[in-house]
Amino acid sequence: MYIILKKKIKYYTKESCKLFSIMAIALGLIIAIILLKYKTTYMVTLSGQEIGYVENETELKERIQKEIIEMEGKNIDFVSLNEMPNYELKLVSRKQETNEEEIMLALKEKARIMYKYYAVNLNNETVGLVDNIEEAEQAINQIKEEHQNDTIQLDLSVTENYTENIEEINLETVQVAQTQVEEKVAVLIEQDQKSKMPSINGILLAVAPVQGNITSRFGAISSIRSGAHTGTDIACSIGTQIKAVADGTVTFAQKSGPYGNLIKISHGNGVETWYAHCKVLYASVGQQINAGDVIAAVGMTGNTTGPHLHLEIRVDGTAINPQQYLYK
């Protein structure tokens, strides 16, 4: 009996080993087939939505931190993610591709990025927006130095600003902003100069026609005149250029008795200037003249004892004293 039982145990043990071997082989085949068709990878989700797959969770986390640090060095004040991605290990088809770049893009879209930019200001008005504070400060310091002796007020500064929508900010190069500032400074200088110019009825008397010594003043009495002097005489050498006092239109340009060669310019609002005793007349009737244009040359034509310019200013036909406005 004992021998029979022993044989049966031996038989069943042997059959069991065969069965386990077959099962192990089958399991191995199944695993091999799975490994051929599938792989383990991490599914990445954000706010419960799948955004991609990566093979290495740690590497992606390190890249996220690295890119945040690098971004904060590019005119970005700070970068924050309201939610970090979740990782879940999955068995997926080997055809499933990893897409780390798409994941990074999705994270950037969800990130809160605060950008820095700089406003270049002139007298509390923003002139340009730039992204380089060092170059901007260098540019405005250069402008300040160039105009340090000017009488105008120049309050130049660079201020730091922040935005989450940098695409909506019209950033310029520092060179462009500097040019814009210089153009506005030139306008301010011109306005300042005009504000100090004498004017009659709103007409700016921008230029003295000649430089020289006053030899006869307005209202003076002389034996060579029939009445009081109606202008101011400025002694100059023959041929000295005579410039228009203000913008206007030439209304007379020819000889006129004791005035000799005479040019009259109408400036509007009843204001007129006369230039007498000229040697040569360069302007003609109807010609549009700008302040400072050369219109004639000093001579001694007409009733004169020496080369000079006789300058008259008339308002509504009446002569007034030029020295109230010029040659003070």
Image: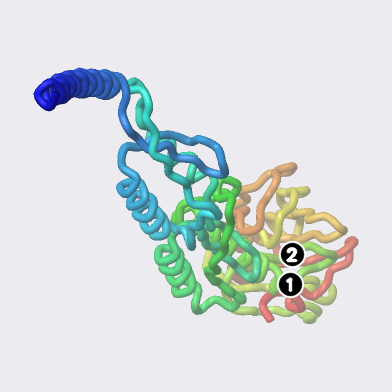
Query: Element under label 2?
Result: strand
Toward the viewer: 300 or 2? 2
Q: How is the image coloured?
A: rainbow
Q: Horizontal placement of 3 versus 94: left or right?
A: left
x%, y% of residue 276? Answer: 69, 61
Give residue 302's position: percent from left, percent from top: 69, 61
Q: Quadrant of residue 36?
A: top left
Q: Label 1, secondary structure: give it.
A: loop
Amino acid type at image mark 2: Leu
Q: For residue 167, which quarter of the picture?
A: top right
- In the rendered image, the residue lying farthest to the left is 3
Within 10 Å of the Cα at label 2, are there few (<14), some (14-19), or many (20+) other Cα atoms?
some
**Residue 183, image x and y in percent?**
56, 58
The amino acid beneath tag 1 is Pro
Q: Residue at x 80, y 71 (%)?
A: 230
Asked if residue 21 shows in the view, the reply is: no
Q: Is residue 124 left or right of residue 111?
A: right
Residue topped by disc 1: 198
Q: Residue at x 27, y 20 (%)?
A: 30
Vertical relation: 55 (above or below) 315: above
Whichever of callouts 2 and 1 sits on the residue coming sooner in the sequence is 1
| Residue drawn at the location 34% of the way across and 45% of the way down | 57
The residue wearing badge 2 is 204
**Which of the two residues, 68 or 16, is positioned nearer the viewer here?**
16
Q: Give me the residue at 50% from left, 51% from top.
A: 172
Tag 2–tag 1 contact (CB < 8 Å): yes
Residue 105, percent across and down? 46, 40
Neighbour tally class for label 1: few under 14, some 14-19, many 20 plus, Cα within 10 Å:
some
How many numbered marks have been drawn onto this rendered protein structure?
A: 2
Towards the viewer: 60 or 114: 60
Please tell me whether residue 116 is drawn above or below residue 47 in the rendered image. Answer: below
